[in-house]
Image (tube, helix red, strand yellow):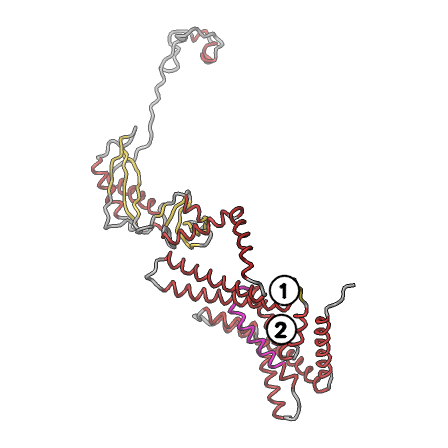
Amino acid sequence: MEQIDPDLLDAGQQLFEQAQTFLRDMAQPWQFYQAAILLALFGAAHLIRRWLGPRLLERVRAREGWPRWRLRLAIIVENRLRGVIFVVLAWSLYLVLEDLAPEARNYVIEVWAVIASAWVLVSFAGQLIRNRPLRRILTWAAWIYIALHFLGFLEQAANFLDSIAITVEDFRLSLLTVIVALLLTGLLIFLARLLTRIAVNRIEAYEDLSPSSRVLAGKAVQLVLFSLAIVIGLRALGFDLTALAVISGAIGLGIGFGLQKVVSNLFSGIVILLDKSIKPGDVISLGSTFGWVNQLGARYVSVVTRDGREYLIPNEDLVTGQMVNWSHSDEFVRLDLAFATSYGDDPHLVRRIAVEAARTVPRVLADRQVRCHITGFGDYSVNYLLRFWIADATRGLASVRGEIYLALWDAFKEHGITIPFPQREVKLLDTPPHGPAGETGPGDPARGPQAHNPANTGPETGAAR
């Protein structure tokens, strides 16, 4: 039978003896009375919170014009109002007892007042962490640490967790080391996200940098900070980072075979940021997708269309495929609009009216020429091409084309210019009863139903006269 580790038995014995000492002290009458008083104070804090909480929320909702952070702070305080009230009642009771009976030992009330105060502060500080699972893990870990520290169990609990370990040659990994490493890594990731957010805001404030350079600098800061957080977490576990060379080689081999697209999109994103081919706010079209760039990601580019849809286009498609950037060097875009008029209308007049109608549309640039050209003579119309410039392609192209078509319609109607539509003339010719290629019998369907009537064999048997 496998023997239990002596270190584990010794640590467990120390923790058990400390628990016996704590329970022996709590079994004294005055300590027990203090615990009962604290339970009563907690119940009173709960009742006060149920009465005061809704009224506080009503007053907050009645405040108009408050900034968002103040409203959020009021909601956070309301959610933790019970703990705040309990802390106030516990410290008030402790001060009163110290004043009335300074010789009495109010140890239980003092300790739990300190613990409750620390718990409330940790609860408020945890709201700085936006990631909910990470916030809960760090908050609960801080609460447990505070309780063990002030109750006197911290050293014995740490020894017990450290005694639960596995050893492989010179490497020892204990449960305490894993917990500390996870908490440290989580805290470092939180700090990395916070510092990244601050750094990105500072970088965005530099207007001398191009949008692509700002995004690239923000991604670089994020990569460095998160890499440091992971490396420090691994060092806290006791890993030798020199052994990661073999692991990195295996990862590189796996990337070469299985993660080609992921790595390709990652490096394509870096290329996009470096060559400044697109940047946030640019209007691009790729295939049937037309919209403006909302965000440049590590793997994809977010493009928002006019109908509110957000397309996540892989970076590789933008680098290797053909893409139209309507605002790469400037925001000016020339559009072509085709229309046609009847042959009876004067083309000189049509061109002049079309140019004047296009200039009445507000989105058409007045400082750039509007031109109208004849592109050809069709079967039933004279074809024209109207060219104009806009500087706000983000507002859509179909809308400005529709406005110009409507302006052309009104102008043509005012001047009597007609817009033709296809017309065909169909002539039905007489057909002889016997075709040139041979005779048709009376039952031939090509002769129609008149072939069965002998009275219709006269000279006037054509389909139409």
Tell me how many marks there are: 2
The image shows residue 61, relative to residue 293, as above or below, that is below
User: Magenta stretch: residue 338 in it?
Assistant: no
Q: Is residue 182 or residue 288 the one in the foreground? A: 182
Q: Nearer the viewer, residue 141 or 124?
A: 141
Q: Is residue 63 left or right of residue 141?
A: left
Label 2 secondary element? helix
The residue located at (21%, 35%) in the rendering is 346
Identify residue for label 2: 144
Left or right of residue 33: residue 50: left
Asked whether 2 or 403 is in front, the reply is: 2
Quadrant of the image occupied by residue 358: top left
Q: Determine the residue located farthest toward the left in the rendered image.
A: 348
Residue at 53% x, 55% y is 248
Q: Position of residue 138 (x, y in %)?
A: 57, 69
Q: Which of the two labelled residues, at mark 1 and mark 2, occupies the earlier sequence position?
A: 2
The secondary element bearing badge 1 is classed as loop
Q: Quadrant of the C terminus?
A: top left
- Per the image, the residue denoted by label 1 is 170
From the top left corner, tell me how far across and down residue 45 is, in percent. 61, 78
Q: CA distance from mark 1 to mark 2?
A: 31 Å
The residue at the far right in this view is 1
The residue stretch that appears in magenta: 112-131
Q: Is residue 171 above or below residue 399?
A: below
- Circle 2 crowding by C-alpha within 10 Å: few under 14, some 14–19, many from 20: few
Three-letter amino acid code at the position of disc 1: Asp
Q: Is residue 410 above or below residue 185?
A: above
| Amino acid of disc 2 | Ile
Within 10 Å of disc 1 (Cα), the crowding (few <14, some 14-19, many 20+) is: few
Residue 118 drawn in magenta? yes
Residue at left 68%, top 82%?
35
